[in-house]
C-alpha cells in the first residue's frame, strides 16, 4: 500500500512529519509493496487560501495513496479523505516518517477516528 | 498526586493503550523497549498525555537514553467552576442534535453554561458565517459569546491556533449526539483536547486565561 506522509522537509524516512496536512510543505509517499520505495514532492496546495485539504487529497489520489499521515486534519480534509477511501493517521510531534511508518505497519498506530457518543 | 506507573513501550500490557500519544515523546533511538515512568493522575491523564505530546508541547523531563520521563498533569479529571461550552451543531435541536464535523460551516452552536458537571443554561445560537465562512471569523465570534471551550468534529492546526489565541480550549475528533458529547467532555473522556496555551498553574476548571466567569458578556434569556 501507498502511505502519504505530510512532512516538513527532506527526502527520506528520517523526515519529520508535519503538523499540517493540507498546508504541509512536502509529501513523502512510501510504497510498502515495493520495498518501501519513496517518492517526495512539494505540496502544490500548501499556499492555497481555501480548500488546501481537499486539494491535497486530490493530489494524493493521483498518486494512488491508500492512507495519509499528518499531525492534524481539518474537517474538509477529513471529509475528502473519507470520500476518497483514504485512511487518516495522526502522527506525533517530533515523529519521523520512519517511526510512524513502523507504528502503522505494526498496528500500534490506529487510524484517526471520530469518537462518537 | 496519582499513581506512578512503569510501562514498557511496545509490550502487551494494559498500558499499550497509551500507544501512539507517548510515542512522540520518546527519542527515536529509544523508541522500542524503553522503560518509562509515567506520573499518572486520574481519568484525564490520557487526555493530558495526548495533548501534551502533540500540541501543547510536553512538560517532559527527558533523561536521554535513560528514558525516564514524567508528564505533568495539565488537566484535572473533574471540571470545577463555571464554564461556557460551545458545541458545533448540524441542526438547531440543541443538546438533542448532532455535533457537526465542520466548526465553521455548521448552522448553529449549542452554547451551554455549566457549573462543574451541572448544566445551568443551554441556548442555540445560529452561525452568522454559515454561508460565508472565512478563517478567523468563528473563533472571534465564539470568543465574543464568552465561550471557554469549543467542541467540534474536525479542526486543522490553523483554526486550533486561532481558538488558542482567544484563550478557547478546543476538543476535536468527536461526533454524535450533542448531549452525550457534552457529558463525555465533562467526564474527561474526550481524547482530542487541545488546551489553551496560556501559561498557568491553576486548575483548569477555574477557566482558562484571563477570561473566567464574569467577564462582562451578556447572558441572553
Image (cartoon, coloured by chain):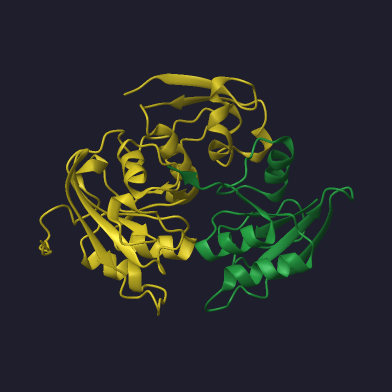
Chain colours: A green, B yellow
Q: In the displayed structure, does residue A31 sit left or right of residue B148?
A: right
Question: How many marks are shown on the rendered structure?
Answer: 0
Q: Quadrant of the C terminus of chain B?
A: bottom left
Examine the rendered structure and indicate whether residue B67 appears above or below residue A59.
Answer: above
Question: Residue visible at 57% across and 42% down?
Answer: B24
Residue B42 position in % (x across, y down): 35, 26
Question: Residue visible at 45% across and 48% down?
Answer: B57
Residue B187 position in % (x across, y down): 32, 35
Examine the rendered structure and indicate whether residue B34 appears above or below residue B104.
Answer: above
Examine the rendered structure and indicate whether residue A59 appears above or below residue A34.
Answer: below
Q: In the displayed structure, does residue B182 sit left or right of residue A90?
A: left
Q: Quadrant of the N terminus of chain B?
A: top left
Question: Residue visible at 37% across and 72% down?
Answer: B136
On the image, which quarter does residue B32 sit in?
top right
Residue A80 position in % (x across, y down): 61, 64
Examine the rendering and report whether any part of residue A20 can be seen: no
Q: In the displayed structure, does residue B115 sit left or right of residue A26?
A: left
Question: Residue visible at 51% across and 35% down?
Answer: B62
Examine the rendering and report whether any part of residue A116 can be seen: yes
Q: In the displayed structure, does residue B42 sit left or right of residue A116?
A: left
Most extreme residue toward the right is A34
Name the residue nearer the viewer: B76 or A2: A2
Amino acid at each position: 500500500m501507498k502511505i502519504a506522509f505530510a512532512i516538513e522537509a527532506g527526502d527520506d524516512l528520517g523526515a519529520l512529519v508535519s503538523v499540517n496536512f493540507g498546508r504541509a510543505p512536502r509529501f513523502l509517499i512510501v510504497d510498502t509493496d515495493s520495498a518501501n520505495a519513496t517518492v517526495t514532492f512539494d505540496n502544490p496546495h500548501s499556499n492555497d487560501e481555501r480548500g488546501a485539504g481537499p486539494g491535497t487529497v486530490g493530489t494524493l489520489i493521483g498518486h494512488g495513496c491508500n492512507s495519509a499521515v499528518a499531525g492534524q486534519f481539518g474537517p474538509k480534509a477529513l471529509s475528502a479523505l473519507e470520500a476518497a477511501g483514504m485512511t487518516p493517521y495522526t502522527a506525533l510531534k517530533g515523529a519521523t516518517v520512519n517511526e510512524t511508518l513502523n507504528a502503522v505497519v505494526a498496528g500500534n498506530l490506529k487510524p484517526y477516528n471520530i469518537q462518537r457518543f | 498526586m496519582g499513581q506512578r506507573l512503569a510501562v514498557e513501550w511496545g509490550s502487551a500490557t494494559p498500558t499499550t493503550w497509551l500507544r501512539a500519544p507517548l510515542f512522540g515523546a520518546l527519542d527515536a533511538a529509544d523508541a522500542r523497549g524503553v522503560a518509562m515512568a509515567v506520573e499518572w493522575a486520574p481519568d484525564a491523564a490520557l487526555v493530558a498525555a495526548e495533548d501534551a505530546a502533540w500540541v501543547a508541547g510536553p512538560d517532559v523531563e527527558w533523561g536521554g537514553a535513560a528514558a525516564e520521563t514524567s508528564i505533568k498533569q495539565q488537566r484535572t479529571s473533574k471540571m470545577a467552576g463555571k464554564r461556557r461550552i460551545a458545541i458545533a451543531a448540524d441542526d438547531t435541536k440543541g443538546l438533542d442534535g448532532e455535533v457537526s464535523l465542520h466548526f465553521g460551516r455548521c448552522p448553529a452552536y449549542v452554547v451551554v453554561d455549566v457549573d462543574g458537571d451541572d448544566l445551568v443554561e443551554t441556548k442555540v445560537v445560529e452561525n452568522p458565517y454559515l454561508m460565508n465562512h472565512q478563517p478567523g471569523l468563528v473563533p472571534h465570534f465564539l470568543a465574543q459569546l464568552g465561550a471557554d471551550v469549543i467542541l467540534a468534529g474536525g479542526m486543522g492546526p490553523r483554526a486550533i491556533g486561532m481558538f488558542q489565541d482567544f484563550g478557547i480550549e478546543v476538543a476535536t475528533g468527536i461526533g454524535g449526539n450533542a448531549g452525550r458529547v457534552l457529558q463525555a467532555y465533562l467526564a474527561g473522556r474526550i481524547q482530542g483536547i487541545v488546551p489553551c496555551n496560556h501559561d498557568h498553574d491553576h486548575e483548569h476548571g477555574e477557566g482558562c486565561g484571563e477570561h473566567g466567569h464574569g467577564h462582562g458578556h451578556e447572558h441572553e434569556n
